[in-house]
Image (cartoon, rainbow, N blue to C red):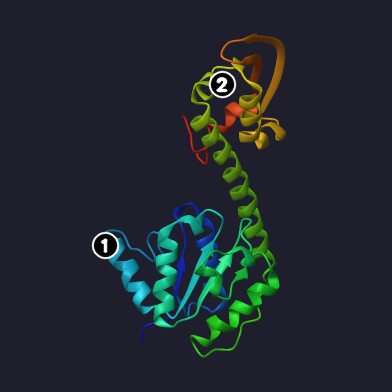
Amino acid sequence: MDRPIVFISHISEESAIAVTIKKLIDESFLGMLDVFVSSDNGESLPMGSRWLQRINDALKKCSVELILCSPQSIKRPWINFEAGAGWIRGIPVIPLCHSGMEPGGLPVPLDSLQAAKISDVESLKLILPILASAINARVPDVPLENFIAKVKAFEEKNMFWNIINSELQALDRKFHPLFEMLMNGTAEVMMSEIEIDKLENSIKELISMGYLRIERTGYGELIDNWKQQIEVTPTDNYKKLFSNKECAFFRE
């Protein structure tokens, strides 16, 4: 007899936390539930399998669906599609909020579902009975402290890189010549006060974290309008960001 399937919907960037949840469920329910995680190569998706067909099959057969919701994942249409597939079938569909996403901040249609926060013990305790009912079993009494610690470590790393990548992308998009100049060291550019304000707002976290410094040199001139010279200085830590594979502009 096939085991009931728990489908964990997630984006690829958050596969680590999906696999951590799978491990918690496997250990808590002694393998009586079949937890499907598309990024868990070799288990949910064996080598050589038709991955899209396997995902569709799991969506059609699952008894419970867990949706990993972060400020990034809720923007992906695939997440809403998978949530909708479970809702149409009338099975429990539970958004699991993390990395700054709060249950009260979920967008339509996810806001109509009973959500939980996976870094909160009390929220997790509400999920376990739903999983237990899928196999008509008692709710397991499992320690959650280690799991919570792993989730918070992931959230800290995930939120950090979300901020860094967002501001690097804004810098590249709005001030591309400056972005390229900074790869070679301090950049001197002429900007209007409006442009300087726009730059500072675009990279305020990179500045506050000490990755970049902006200094007005005092020199100015009238071109189309009044512009002044500024120096934008990258620190050694700024350059190290690009050697990390989490960086959107990773360079070996």
Q: Where 48 sits versus 182, above or below?
A: below
Label 2 sits on residue:
182
Q: CA distance from mark 1 to mark 2?
A: 44 Å
Can you see residue 22? Answer: no
Q: Nearer the viewer, residue 44 or 116?
A: 116
Picture quadrant of residue 46: bottom left
Disc 2 marks which amino acid?
Leu
Q: For the point 54% across and 35% down, which residue is it? A: 170
Which is nearer the eye, 228 or 179? 228
Placement of 242 over or under 31, stated as above or below = above
Q: On the image, numbered disc 1 is attached to which residue?
A: 50
Residue 246 seen in render = yes
Which structural element holds mark 1? Answer: loop
* Residue 21 % position (x, y): 54, 66
Instruction: From the top left corner, tell me how far across and down residue 70 is, in percent.
Output: 56, 58
Query: Please, is residue 228 above or below residue 236 in the view?
Result: above
Q: Nearer the viewer, residue 104 or 236?
A: 104
